[in-house]
Amino acid sequence: MATNFTVKVVGDQLEKALKKMKNKSIKFGLVKEMRQRQYFEKGSDKRIRKQKEMIVNHKKKKRLRERNI
């Protein structure tokens, strides 16, 4: 997954630009993807992991909906 984004450095605010870059990379999911691609993952293992993620996300959304009611 290739995601292009730019961060402009205004003046000497390099630390602020690095912080923005870090936040954008987390938002786009690049950090998570790099960790997953660090090692090869079989197709069946990937499918099982995604199913578990879907279950967790579903439970989280259900909990949030019940809290708002």
Image: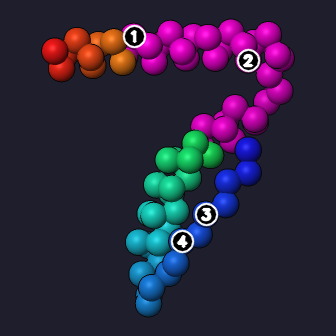
Q: Label 1 neighbourhood size at 10 Å, few (<14), some (14-19), many (20+)?
A: few
* Residue occupying the point 56% across, 47% down: 28
69 lies left or right of 40: left
Q: Which residue is mark 1?
A: 59
Q: Looking at the picture, which amino acid does disc 4 mark?
A: Val
Which quadrant is home to the N terminus? Answer: top right
Contact between marks 4 and 2 (CB within 8 A): the answer is no
Disc 4/disc 2 C-alpha distance (Å): 32 Å
Q: Label 4 neighbourhood size at 10 Å, few (<14), some (14-19), many (20+)?
A: few
In the rendered image, residue 10 lying in the magenta stretch gets the answer: no
Residue 13 sits above or below residue 28 on the image = below
Mark earlier in primary sequence (3, 1)? 3
27 lies left or right of 47: left
Q: Which residue is mark 4?
A: 7
36 lies left or right of 24: right
Q: Label 3 neighbourhood size at 10 Å, few (<14), some (14-19), many (20+)?
A: few
Q: Which residue is mark 3?
A: 5
